Image (spheres, coloured by chain):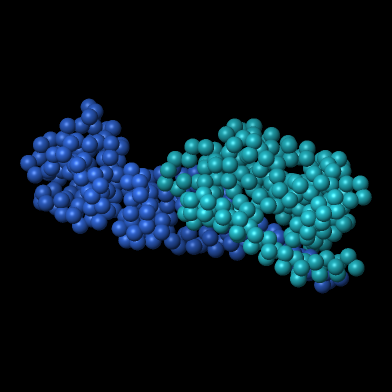
Chain colours: A cyan, B blue
Amino acid sequence: MDIIKYIFDLTGSLICHQLPDRSLTYGDMVFPVCARDTGIYAGIFTSFIFIMLARRLKAQKPLKLAAAVVMVLLMAPMMADGALSYAGVMDTNNAVRLFTGLFFGLPIPFLLVPAANFDVYGHNEMAVVKRWYEVPLVYLAGVLLAVLLLNGVVPYIAAGFIFTSGFLFLISRLAYTIFARAGIRRKLKLYSLTLLATSAVLSFLYILSVYILQPIRGMLTT
Amino acid sequence: MDYNTQKQCSYCGETIPRKAGRCPYCGSILEVNVDDNFGTDVYGQQQDTGENTPYQPHTESGQENASGGQMHENDMESGSGSGSENTYGSQNQNPNQYQNKQTNSSGYNSYNNYNSSNYNTRRPDYSEDRQPYAPNGGRQPLSNGLKVFLTVLFTLVPGIGQLAGIITAIVFMSTEEDSDRRSFGVALLVSNLILFVLACIGCFTVFLIAQNMSI
């Protein structure tokens, strides 16, 4: 258990300040990332699971414009909440952080998957969202997960797994998308480069965390 | 290389989709090959001698043939849209003009190399409502200035700029038969998603530092 907690905390330290008063808890255990990041990666995780279950990882067709506009506009509250609270204009709490973060994270896989597979010169048959009710369904699942996380129902290990999966999906899929758009078609080469780039990004984040983020966190907590 | 779906850019030599009107690697505007335009109509091995045997379309009106491809630039030079008289020989004052064009086009020569038995020079009729050849689905391609402007705008405005960029990218990606807008749209989408994630992480880190310094 200690090793698992150490891995989750180390992964969380790469991208999050991990301030206890801004983080959710399960019993007496503080989650590895803050409430906002928990929401973001829970959103990414939920959409990712949906895309996996629906077998749309190779979807080419982007979202319909109306759905894209709604989903992208729902990303804005997190920016407003973060900016206004850091600027001292308004107070916020963990529930707001969690839900605004969730709405930020939910659209990301729906945008990233077709971005990698989109065929500029051909017909894009497979849509990432095929029926109109799929989007509200995913959002409902995300909200349900967020409610469970907020009320401390989700165990620490499950929450850590959700965060770690969402985080790794985000980094690796961004790298995959860049290489796919660069015209690399051979799968072995594509996956190898994706793995290499993901490792490089994680290493870079570790250095950044050790020399910038953690010293700031230390100063804030003392 | 799969010659049914791919060809070689005559400027940079990269392998590109056969229907590409512009090379995605070097950006060169490519000539449209005859085999792209009329790939579904193979009329045997008869070579054009300038005697102008009228082309017999497979359909009554010839519309199917016309919609299957795009008009070659020679048609525009010699006046397109002149109806059923538009057989190859009657269009061109110099019957050798078309043949010379093929010889000078490196892209077409490569086609001859692999599929010379199906080579066909006879031109189909064009109906009167035939539109002149225009790449990108008849739309004007986006100017480089506009692309640079949009990219800079969406990049420099943190948060809101990326949101607008993602929506703009979806709009461009949803356009049909417009490879220019579609390729720009997907590039815009990828760049804005990366910038969005970086901006959020970066902004909150900067806010944290600022908050710490103000304590």
Instruction: Give the side of residue A34 with respect to residue A192, left or right.
Output: right
The picture places residue B102, in percent across and down from the top left corner, at: 20, 52
Q: Which residue occupies the extreme top position in the image?
A: B60
Residue under the point 16% across and 35% down: B55
| B180 vs A60, nearest the viewer | A60
Nearest the camera: B7 or A111? Answer: B7
Q: In terms of depth relative to the viewer, which is nearer, B25 or A72?
A: B25
Q: Position of residue B107 (x, y in %)?
A: 27, 53
Q: Quadrant of residue A21?
A: bottom right
The percent coordinates of residue A106 (x first, y second) are 68, 45
Q: Position of residue A140 (x, y in %)?
A: 73, 36
Q: Is residue A55 visible?
A: yes
Residue found 54% across the figure and 38% down from its top: A127
Q: Please give left or right for residue B133 compared with residue B125 in the image.
A: right
**Placement of the C terminus of chain B among the 4 image quadrants:** bottom right
Q: Residue at x 75, y 49 (%)?
A: A163
Residue B202 vs residue B127: left or right? right
In the image, farthest residue toward the bottom:
B213
Q: Is residue B193 visible?
A: no
Q: Is residue A23 left or right of residue A126?
A: right
> What is the residue that sits farthest to the left in this orientation?
B51
Q: Please report the residue visible at 65 percent of the width from the left and 55 percent of the height from the top.
A: A171
Q: How many marks?
A: 0
